Image (tube, rainbow, N blue to C red):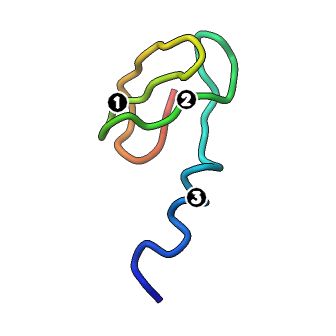
Amino acid sequence: MPVGYGKRIRQEVQAYKCPSCSRNTVRRFAPAIWVCSKCKAKFASGTFEFKV
């Protein structure tokens, strides 16, 4: 099995709740930088998981 097997599916499902607009639209932009796709707010959080 290749290393990245199922990566795209995991990334599509993985969205976190935005603290400012309360929608499940926060996604990872870069390591430890997270961006809400609706309100465009940026957050600094965990490297691999969004922690409020």
Decide: is 17 above or below 8: above
Residue occupied by mark 3: 10
Residue depth check, mark 1 versus mark 3: number of the one nearer the observer: 3
The residue depicted at 43 percent of the width and 37 percent of the height is 28
Whole-percent x and y of residue 46? 38, 38
In-image side of 3 versus 50 (left or right): left
User: Could you say whether the residue bearing mark 2 is in a helix, strand or loop?
Assistant: strand
* Residue found at the very far front of the displayed protein: 8
Residue occupied by mark 1: 33
The residue depicted at 39 percent of the width and 78 percent of the height is 3
* Residue found at the very far bottom of the displayed protein: 1
Q: Give the quadrant of residue 25.
A: top right
User: Could you say whether the residue bearing mark 3 is in a helix, strand or loop?
Assistant: helix
Question: Cα distance, mark 1 to mark 2?
Answer: 10 Å
Whole-percent x and y of residue 42? 41, 17
Decide: is 44 above or below 30: above
Amino acid type at circle 2 is: Val
Residue occupied by mark 2: 26
Question: Cα distance, mark 2 to mark 3?
Answer: 14 Å
